[in-house]
Image (cartoon, rainbow, N blue to C red):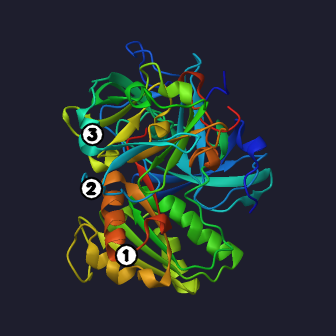
C-alpha cells in the first residue's frame, strides 16, 4: 500500500468488474498514437510474414478476406489505464496466418504502415490469442483506430496491438519496438502491471 | 536538465504539494517537491498515484509543465491539472489535495514526445486546450537553456478565459526572441479580435506554422479530434509524418 492521500476516497467501487490493477473502465474508445494517422489504400495494402530464413508469406486485402474469419469478443487494456470490456472484432487468427510458415523463431516484431513497431514472443501470437482485425463493432475499422487492419492481442497492453499493421518479422533474437525503446515494458502483461521498463 | 535515469524513474517516490497556482477556472498548476527527482526532458510526463484509506489506488499521467525548479527542500516539478468532469483524480487534486500533502510520483516517463534543447531545427507547437502543458515545458526549457531554435506556437482555446499560462505567454512573446504565438478561439474571441471564432483549419496552420521546406519539428497535443485534424493538415501541407509528433488525450480522470 502506498502513502494514504488525505481525503482521497476514490470512486465507489462495489460494482466494479474485475479489471487489471490500476485500470479504470471507459465506455468510449480513446485514440493514442505517436504521429499522424496513416491512410492506407486497400488496393495496395498487404500483410507480410517474413520468416527468419528470408522466406516471405504475403496476403493482399482480397486474400485476407478469403481466409476463415473469426469474431473475437475481448476486453482491451491500455497502458494509459483505460480498459474497455466486451469489444467485438472480426479478422483472421494469427494461427491461420502462421499455419504453414516454416519457422523456429521465438520472437516477432510487428511493423506498421507509418513505421511503428512492437515486439512480442511468437508464442503470444499463437493459440487463439491474436488476430489481424479489420472490423470493429460491426463496421470497418476507422483509420484512427488502426484501419484498414490492426493487430489484436488483447491479453497484452494495447500498444502491442499494432495499428495499421503491415507485417510481422519472425526473429531468433528479441528486438524491442517503438514504445519498448522509449521506456515501456518489453512484454506488457496488464495483470502484472508491466507498464514501464523495470516493472 | 539531466536526461532520465531509469533506476529512479522506475520507482514510486513521495512528493509533496508546496505551491498551487490557479491558471483558469478549470486548471491549476501544482508545484511538487520531489527530493529524488532525477531530471527530465521537456515533453515528458509523470504518473501521480493516490491511495485511499482502504488501500484503493488510482494513478493518472500528467505532463510536466517546465524545467526543474530548485527549492529549499530539494527539486520541484510542476504539473498543470485540468479538471475532468466526473473525474476521479483531477477533482481531488484541484479541490482536496492540500499544502504539504503527500502524493506518489513516478517519472519521468515517455521518451518520444520530447524536445531536446540542443536541437536547432525550427519548432512548431500546436496545442488544443490543456494540450499546452507539455508544449509550455518546451517553451520554458528553450528560455532556460538559452536555445536559439525558432519557435512558433498555435494555441486553440474555447475563450480567452481558457488560456492556461496567459500572463506568462504575454511576457514570453515580449521577452523571448524568436518565439511567435497565434491563438485560435473556437467559441468566443477577445474584444477587438480580427476574425470569427472557429475551429483550427488549414489557414491557421498554413499562416502561423513553419513551411515544410524549413524542416521543422512539430509537436501537436490536445484532444483526439483536434490532434487528428491538425496532424492530417500538416501531412497534407507536405510535412513528413516522422517529423510530426503527437500526443492525444482522451478521458482521464
Inspect this view and state whether residue A7 appears: no
Q: Are marks 1 and 3 on the same chain?
A: no
Question: Could you tell me which secondary element the residue under label 3 belongs to?
Answer: helix
Q: Which mark is residue B252?
A: none
The answer to the question of whether label 1 and label 3 lie on touching residues, with beta carbons closer than 8 A, is no
Q: Nearer the viewer, residue B53 or B231?
A: B231
What is the x, y in percent for residue B77?
66, 54
Question: Could you tell me which secondary element the residue under label 1 belongs to?
Answer: loop
Residue occupied by mark 2: A41
What is the x, y in percent for residue A10?
48, 26
Q: Is residue B95 left or right of residue A106?
A: left
Question: Disc 3: which chain?
Answer: A
Residue occupied by mark 1: B238
Q: Is residue A133 left or right of residue B135?
A: left
Q: Nearer the viewer, residue B46 or A38?
A: A38
What is the x, y in percent for residue B165?
49, 66
Question: Disc 2: which chain?
Answer: A
Q: Is residue B74 left or right of residue A83?
A: right
Which dot, 2 or 3, sits closer to the camera? 3
Q: Quadrant of the N terminus of chain A?
A: top right
Question: Disc 1: which chain?
Answer: B
**In which image quadrant can residue A93 be found?**
top left
Distance CA(mark 1)–CA(mark 3):
33 Å
Q: Image height check: is B7 above or below A143?
A: above
Residue occupied by mark 3: A63
Amino acid at each position: 500500500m502506498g502513502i494514504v492521500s488525505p481525503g482521497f476516497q476514490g470512486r465507489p467501487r462495489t460494482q466494479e468488474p474485475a479489471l487489471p490493477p490500476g485500470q479504470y473502465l471507459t465506455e468510449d474508445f480513446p485514440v493514442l498514437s505517436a504521429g499522424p494517422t496513416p491512410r492506407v489504400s486497400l488496393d495496395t495494402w498487404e500483410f507480410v510474414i517474413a520468416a527468419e530464413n528470408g522466406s516471405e508469406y504475403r496476403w493482399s486485402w482480397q486474400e485476407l478476406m478469403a481466409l476463415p474469419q473469426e469474431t473475437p469478443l475481448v476486453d482491451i487494456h491500455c497502458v494509459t489505464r483505460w480498459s474497455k470490456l466486451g469489444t467485438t472484432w472480426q479478422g483472421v487468427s494469427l494461427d491461420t496466418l502462421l499455419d504453414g510458415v516454416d519457422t523456429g523463431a521465438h520472437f516477432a516484431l510487428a511493423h506498421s504502415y507509418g513505421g511503428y513497431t512492437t515486439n512480442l514472443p511468437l508464442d503470444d501470437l499463437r493459440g487463439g490469442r491474436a488476430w489481424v482485425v479489420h472490423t470493429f463493432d460491426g463496421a470497418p475499422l476507422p483509420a484512427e483506430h488502426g484501419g484498414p487492419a490492426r493487430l489484436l492481442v488483447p491479453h497484452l497492453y494495447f500498444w502491442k496491438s499494432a495499428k495499421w499493421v503491415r507485417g510481422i518479422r519472425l526473429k531468433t533474437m528479441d528486438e524491442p519496438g517503438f514504445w519498448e525503446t522509449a521506456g515501456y515494458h518489453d512484454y506488457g502483461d496488464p495483470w502484472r502491471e508491466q507498464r514501464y521498463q523495470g516493472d | 536538465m539531466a536526461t532520465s535515469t531509469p533506476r529512479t524513474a522506475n520507482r514510486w517516490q513521495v512528493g509533496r504539494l508546496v505551491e498551487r497556482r490557479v491558471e483558469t477556472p478549470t486548471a491549476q498548476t501544482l508545484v511538487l517537491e520531489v527530493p529524488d527527482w532525477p531530471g527530465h526532458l521537456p515533453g515528458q510526463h509523470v504518473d501521480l498515484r493516490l491511495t485511499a484509506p482502504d488501500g484503493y489506488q488510482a494513478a493518472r499521467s500528467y505532463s510536466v509543465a517546465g524545467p526543474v525548479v530548485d527549492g529549499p527542500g530539494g527539486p520541484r516539478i510542476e504539473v498543470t491539472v485540468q479538471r475532468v468532469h466526473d473525474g476521479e483524480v483531477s477533482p481531488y487534486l484541484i479541490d482536496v489535495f492540500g499544502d504539504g500533502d503527500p502524493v506518489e510520483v513516478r517519472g519521468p516517463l515517455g521518451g518520444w514526445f520530447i524536445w531536446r534543447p540542443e536541437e536547432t531545427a525550427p519548432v512548431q507547437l500546436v496545442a488544443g486546450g490543456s494540450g499546452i502543458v507539455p508544449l509550455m515545458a518546451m517553451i520554458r526549457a528553450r528560455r532556460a537553456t538559452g536555445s536559439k531554435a525558432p519557435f512558433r506556437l498555435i494555441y486553440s482555446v474555447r475563450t480567452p478565459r481558457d488560456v492556461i499560462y496567459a500572463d506568462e505567454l504575454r511576457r514570453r512573446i515580449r521577452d523571448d526572441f524568436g518565439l511567435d504565438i497565434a491563438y485560435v478561439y473556437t467559441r468566443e474571441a477577445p474584444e477587438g479580435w480580427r476574425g470569427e471564432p472557429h475551429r483550427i483549419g488549414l489557414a491557421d496552420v498554413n499562416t502561423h506554422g513553419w513551411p515544410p521546406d524549413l524542416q521543422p519539428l512539430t509537436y501537436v497535443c490536445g484532444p483526439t479530434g483536434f490532434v487528428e485534424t491538425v496532424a492530417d493538415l500538416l501531412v497534407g501541407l507536405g510535412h513528413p509524418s516522422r517529423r510530426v509528433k503527437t500526443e492525444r488525450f482522451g478521458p482521464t480522470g
